[in-house]
Amino acid sequence: MQPQRIAKTTILDATSYELKLLLRGIILPASLVLFFVYMIIMIIDVDKTGYYNSLPTSFILSVGTLIAIKLLLHTKLEKLEIRRFRFVFLALFCYLIGELIYLYYQVFLGIVVPYPSIGDLFYLSATGFLSFHLYHILHLKKRLLKNKAYHYLGLIGSSFPIYLLIDTIYNYQSYYSDSSIELIINASYYASDAIVIFPCIPIILSLKKKDPFIFHWLLVSLSILVLVSGDLFYTFLASINEELLTITDWLWAFVYAIGYLLLSASILWFSKLKAILEYERYSKHLESEQYDSLNEIQDRENTIFLLDVNDILRNLINLIENSKERIDILFVEVIQKDDIIRFLEILKDTKRIKKSVNIRILLPYSKLDKEIIFRRSNKLISIKHFDRPLATNTITAIIDSEIMYMLGVGTNDDQNKNKFFIKQTTNKMKIYAFDALFEKIWFLEKSIDFGG
């Protein structure tokens, strides 16, 4: 089996195993436990005091918050990863504060259904943060709205809270004759739910359900759908029948608990992916290869080519023209932005001729604007950007899983400091190390870029 296939299969096997463990070992058992816990609460809480309803939800949100804090502090997320998750983290923290306030009202103040309360400000803030998250996905993945069916389903989903909002405003004297604050809170819930549900449905329908590298984004979207459903029914009951809301408060607490469980599981799954796709060992392996190459420049100059940028581009294109199946290229801080653009233009023309060759490129964010790269690639080349430090400082390319080329800066002496070296190897272990590094970065970028 080719090194690239071995590396990819190893990663896929590990993620599939961990995903099954998440589903069968955490989400499903936790959902069943929550169901039985709330059934017991319904039975033992005869007087419907609501003392116990918020305990499970507060516990789940506390666990989810601890996972998020560990991910932020211990795992040391990259800047791009923080940008992708910031609204999810903020929503989780707001939900926790809101749920603790709700718990305080029920347990210490003896208010069975503390609605409206100060906690609602945090619940609404959480919905607002999740709205920012979903619309950010739509901004990056505009193709989602090109599917008219998804578009219409999103509008249909939004129409229900919009109808309740209109009904609330129209019948405010009947529903809220004694409480203008409740009118404002209810209207805010309906408006925020209408905003967040529109992108939620297209995203859920468009995401690949069996792709482990974007499963956390599916969990986030599903959690939003569950939480919004709970909001709508809870808010509607609060406006028409407070006694019925008191009796069924445990049921809505269970619905919210499932939503919080899915939200917490999404963060847990990404932390698992970060552990599986750890790339440091392979990056250091390439670093040692780089140093070996620099030594070869000094010791065996007849086996090393010293090149300028034009020679680099010419040699890379020659390699591509001789390829048969695939090319993987990892760029780092070796050549300048303009040279990368020139290379992509030539590569694009080559791809038109050799359509059967699969070309993948990893570029650091610092080298070129993502939108420019997307236009330059013209969808003929698969390109992802990475925002993580690497031990190596070479351009590394694999041709057909058979030959690896490493291109880096020459020695520091005055004669060669502005030139480059190129090294060729067919060593299977070295090729495997690069393939493992490339696949790990590729899948990790996929996991933070919503599968794009």
Image (spheres, rainbow, N blue to C red):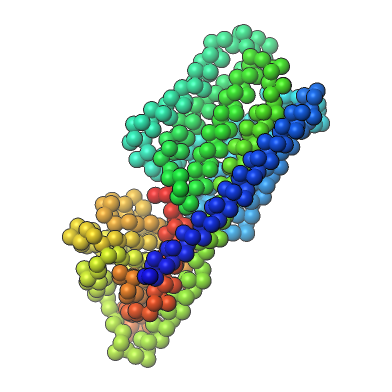
- 365 left or right, relative to 276: left
The foreground one among 282 and 395 is 282
Which quarter of the figure is the N terminus placed in? bottom left
The foreground one among 95 and 20 is 20
Residue at the limit of the structure toward the bottom, as seen here: 299
Image height check: is 128 above or below 434?
A: above
* Residue at 39% from the left image edge and 82% from the top image edge: 293
Residue 48, x across and y down, in percent: 77, 24
Q: Is residue 265 visible?
A: yes
Image height check: is 135 above or below 182?
A: below
Count all numbered tags in the image, as a single digit.
Answer: 0
* Residue at 26% from the left image edge and 62% from the top image edge: 357
The foreground one among 256 and 331 is 256
Residue at the limit of the structure toward the top, as seen here: 174
The foreground one among 441 and 258 is 258
Residue 351, x across and y down, in percent: 22, 59
Q: Quadrant of residue 309?
A: bottom left
Image height check: is 46 above or below 140?
A: above
- 446 left or right, relative to 352: right
Residue 52, x across and y down, in percent: 76, 33
Residue 336, x across and y down, in percent: 33, 65
- 61 left or right, relative to 144: right
Q: Quadrant of residue 244?
A: top right
* Residue at 66% from the left image edge and 33% from the top image edge: 254
Q: Is residue 336 visible?
A: no
* Residue at 50% from the left image edge and 66% from the top image edge: 279
